[in-house]
Image: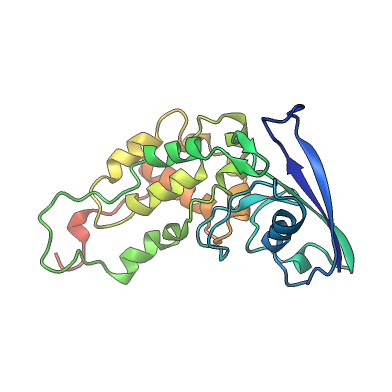
Amino acid sequence: MEVLLRVRRYDPEATNPKPYWAEYTLNDVKRTDRVLDLLHHVKWYLDGTLTMRRSCAHGICGSDAMRINGVNMLACKVLVKDLVKGEKGRIEVAPILGLHVIKDLVVDMEPFFDHYRSVMPYFVNDTEPPTAERMQTAEQRAIFDEGTKCILCAACTTSCPSFWANDSYVGPAAIVQAHRFIFDSRDMAGNDRLAILSEENAVWRCRTIFNCTSACPREIPVTRLIADVKKAIAGTMEIPSTAAVAGD
């Protein structure tokens, strides 16, 4: 099949550094090719100046998040057959929104990771370590299990209108990371994270639009996890205590 691949290009060092659409006609495209395969073909055989991030190519590292036909996706997971129905079609690829574009499809991820770091995304427990491991029941694990699937691709945060309007908003991904520890029965810093997420540019900036849930390549129910955090702050949802750890 034939695909017209349109890529949003930007080179800050160019004579005329304005974003533009570059078009590449690709023949002999297989329906099972991924969008990442098409981008690789352009970079390796047609235009080596094309700049993008990618690493594992298996939907695990999250580095190749971009807007594909106007929707945040991982280029390594999207098949051509899901975007082009006939024997000829067009695919548009652009950088994710809300973050400064460094070049072509590469954006500055540092503000995103600053928000991530701000919610204490690490395990906190200062009690004496047990001889084996800190135990928990399957039910206790299930409360926060979905949030552990996050790969920090930023697809959810950069699909959020609240983040587009205010980049000081901590964003869905950071809240999901906080949820993972707030509701972990072995952790002792849940209240500290809730205090952080109660601040002006934290969880209450969420308007429950569900863009984040739709954008997540790992199918995490992001909006529901954000709602859990809101309920915990409001006192209508209890957060676990280390006293409830299985085996205590």
| Residue 47 visible, this angle | yes
Residue 117 placement (x, y as % from top left): 38, 40
Q: Quadrant of residue 107?
A: top right
The image shows residue 248, relative to residue 210, as above or below, that is below
What coloring was used for the rendering?
rainbow
- Which residue is at a point 63% across and 54% down the rendered structure image? 214
Figure label count? 0
Residue 124 placement (x, y as % from top left): 24, 49
Near-viewer residue (237 or 196): 196
40 displayed left or right of 88: left
197 displayed left or right of 23: left
130 displayed left or right of 112: left
Near-viewer residue (241 or 171): 171
- Which residue is at a point 75% across and 34% down the rendered structure image? 19
Residue 115 placement (x, y as % from top left): 44, 37
The image shows residue 65, relative to residue 134, as above or below, that is above
Quarter of the image where the C terminus is located: bottom left
Q: Quadrant of residue 217?
A: bottom right
Residue 17 placement (x, y as % from top left): 73, 29
- Which residue is at a point 81% across and 44% down the rendered structure image? 22
